[in-house]
Image (cartoon, helix red, strand yellow):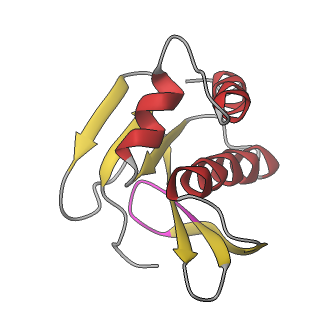
Amino acid sequence: MGNMFKSASIDCSQGLARTEGKWIAPPPGFFKINVDGAISENERNSSVGVVIRDVVGNVHVDCCKYLQGQYSVEEVEAMAMECGLILSKEQKLSHIILESDALTAVTSVTAVETNGCLGYVYQGIRSLFSSFSS
């Protein structure tokens, strides 16, 4: 997956931040979770990818998941965030920064009120996110 992740990040200790360009290491003691979703209009399928790195950039764990069916970009990005947080919980990581290139999904996760068909997904992501130490 390399350095394809950029643009917007959620840091539970610092709120919403934006980064452009190359990957930026998390602070000492933190792990950075980079997530991305992909859709294929012609093949009618979607997928999500997650990479979790430590402060020096070493990959701690990664995964890719194929999703049967075609979803919207926002749906796939939300599922990627959820997948990243679940993987972090499974790895027993407590200090995390979640980073995604989908500003719309990040904004929806951090919104006070979440409406629409993805509202329950964003609420679940917030709930997962709040269960981490910082």
Where residue 47 appears, as percent x and y from the top left, is: 64, 73
Residue 126, compared with residue 62, is above or below; it is: above
Residue 69, compared with residue 112, is above or below; it is: below
Which residues make up the magenta segment?
A: 50-58
Residue 132 can be seen in this image: yes
Residue in the image at 40% along x and 40% along y: 104
Residue in the image at 35% along x and 72% along y: 4
Q: How many marks?
A: 0
Q: Which residue of the protein is positioned furthest toward the top in this rendering?
A: 112
Residue 39 on the magenta span: no
Q: Which residue of the protein is positioned furthest toward the left in this rendering?
A: 21
Residue 12 can be seen in this image: no
93 vs 95, left or right, is right
Residue in the image at 43% along x and 51% along y: 100
Q: Foreground: 65 or 60? A: 65
Residue 110, compared with residue 84, is above or below; it is: above
Where residue 24 appears, as percent x and y from the top left, is: 28, 55
Residue 57 on the magenta span: yes
Q: Foreground: 44 or 77? A: 44
60 vs 112, left or right, is right
Where residue 69 appears, as percent x and y from the top left, is: 76, 72
Residue in the image at 68% along x and 70% along y: 70
91 vs 78, left or right, is right
109 vs 3, left or right, is right
Where residue 134 appears, as percent x and y from the top left, is: 55, 24
Q: Which residue of the protein is positioned furthest toward the bottom in this rendering?
A: 43
Q: Foreground: 123 or 3? A: 123
